[in-house]
Amino acid sequence: MAALYEGYTLCRVVPGQNRGEPAVLGVAEGRETDQVVVTDPGRTVTVYKVSDQKPVGSWTVRQGQALTCPAVCNRQTGEYVVVSDHKVIRVWKDDDLNFDRVFKATVSAEVERVHPVPGSEPLVLFRRGAVRHLDALLAAPQQAVEDVLSEGEAIRWSTSAVDGTQCVLMFITEKGGDHLLYLQRSRPNVLHKYKIECAESGACPVSFTATLQGGNLHFVCLYSDGCVFRSLVSVPAAAAEGVSALPRTLLLRLPVSGGALVSAALLFLDDAHLAVVGAPHPGLGSSQGKDFLCVWNINFQTLQTAKEMTGGAYGQLWCYSGRLYVVHGASLSVLPYACECSSLAAALGKLKQSSPGDARRPAPILSWNALLHGEASEPHRPGKGLETRKSKQARKSHAAVAVTADQVLERVKNASEAGVEEEVQLFLSSASVLEQQLSAGQIAAQLVSRCQTEPSFYPQRTLVQLVQTQCLCHSVCPDLLLLALDKQDYFLSQLCLQHFPDIPEAITCACLKAFLSVLDTDLEPVSVDLGSVSFLDAPGLRSRRLQNGFSPAELEEGGCDVQTEPPGEATGPAVNSLDLPCPVGLKKAALLNEILQTAHSENFLLPHLKDLAAHQVLLFLRYLQFLYLKCSRDLDSQLPGVRAPTVSQIMDWVCLLLDSHFTVLVMVPEAKGLLNSLHKFVQSQVQFFSELGKIHSSLQEINKIKQSEETALYSIEVIKLF
């Protein structure tokens, strides 16, 4: 069983003139699991944080130079490696800003590709077939490199695979229409060659993928006529002379549109699932000519899930950390996926989706009748016969009135708000997860477009229901959140902030400005999720007095305004700061907490924050100060409650506001007390960490003390610190 989840755009790309030209030179795994390294066909290498869809680093070669192979990351050292102008190897780290001053080495032969190897140094594959370890090559860049390939033989594809301590580099070469598979082992150095048979129809190989499991190579080849062949060979322990025949078996036969596959790619997801991009959907006859990303179960030869690639695919597909990276149209898209263990029920589509509440229920007993007729098998219970018949009648009635996505899109154009709600509810209750993922965005966009042309039409409950399916994102329906702000629908705005991972910084600031402007009295009749502000009503929270390990009496006199005085002795609003009242209402606080947890990039957010008025900045700063004082009561960096902001998020926004409005805050008299309070509180924290630093070495010595082996069940041990 496999599923594709809602995707999003990581970055824009410039498509080539022809479908066969790569729009991206390569995508490689980054230093962290949430990072990827994207190399464009020109001069730039960019590192992206995938969950935020934001670049965290970018490097460009000079004008006149060109990158000639995809950049990779050596996760052992945290270094990036790329080749420019075929012979210049560049090695750098995240903190290297000037790309011209990074380590460079010119080698004696042209490089085809650099392949990362988990747990070891990257491998460098030269255009003439030689292979070197990167560290050995950089130690002597001008060392002689042998020619492995014959004259006129060119490398078309290469990859590396690791199985335990064994690493194998594989590459495909072409010469005169003939294709050879090379297996190159290192330590010991072993090379073996296999000939890839031509298809009987004269079709040529289009894409390859391979994995290494248990010392055996699983090699899969996709031909232009849609045939997918699999070969299973053991990795040779010793070199062999000549060329061996590569055995193969037909695995799949994909549909072909327009005579032959032009740009398609396939990739192993696990030992039972194969992803294919660039081929038409096998079950949608009316969609022939469109490119899809399909996940196949190769054990049962069944299609598990599919997603249309708008704009056409370019035959480029990568997979890292449970995410597929696909180039289509003018976008590099990210599609999370999940693969489960294969079973006959899952392959036939009869395995029901599990929900969180199903974990406590006993697993249903599947029978052949259940698989063939869709009937759930249950143990016989007295009195259940009538209920079973009613449930069958209900299912038949429900199936009779089920609607398709096209019907819903047509009916919501003129239906009333109640009619729209009924149609969408019926569709969502009968549609599969895949159908919801494909159609929820189209339905939402249709409704938003109608709301913009008909001001009196606003199906709020239907839009909320579509967002709660978690099949929407901002890029799919970019006007939905703006519509909610225009209608002052703060509940829908909150849901969008919770479920949309790709909200632009300009829209985030628009939401922040709207939340700060609305009056608390106007929010009283509004339904808002208060899970993130439950700490405001937590019993006993105001009675705790410890501040990061300090008691109030231990604070330096006059050093901070957060000292707690006995009741009745407060001389001003800033003296009893731990009991500082929340400057906003409960519902406004819940909305502001969603802003604090929205993904953003500081460089893109700062210009939009400058649009806030001075009184809005002061109000937001006071609320952030209130949150930070709540967090500073103890060592817990997370406020209680569901989706409550963390200390890191709070401080990030404090810094953002001070950076964007520093001049205004210095000039506004009302901000003087607030800035002074923040300054003194930071001073107390610096003092606290200074005291911690003094005992740091002593604490390290305690860890080195060997525990006595004669310790009884109860003992007292005295440790003297000098």
Image (spheres, rainbow, N blue to C red):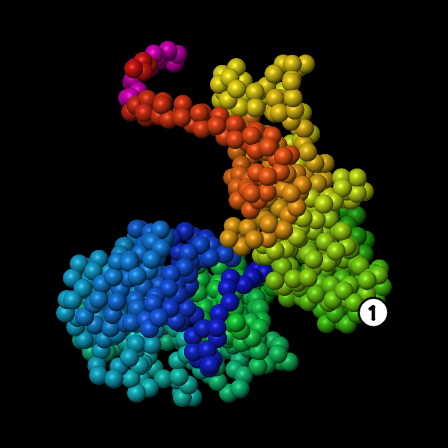
Residue 706 drawn in magenta: yes
Dot 1 falls on a residue whose secondary structure is loop
Instruction: Say left or right for 439 vs 274.
Output: right
Considering every residue shown, the one lying at the far left of the view is 144
Q: Main secondary structure of the magenta part?
A: loop
Residue labelled with disc 1: 414
Q: Residue at x 56, y 75 (%)?
A: 311
Depicted 230 relative to depicted 11: above or below: below
| Residue 385 appears in the rendering | no
Q: Residue at x 21, y 72 (%)?
A: 109
Segment colored magenta = 705-718
Give the amino acid type for the residue marked by disc 1 in the picture.
Asn
Picture coordinates of residue 331, whole percent (x, y) = 52, 68
Q: Position of residue 111 (x, y in %)?
A: 26, 70
Q: Is the residue 379 above or below the residue 394 in the image? A: above
Residue 657 quadrant: top right
Q: Is residue 595 visible?
A: yes
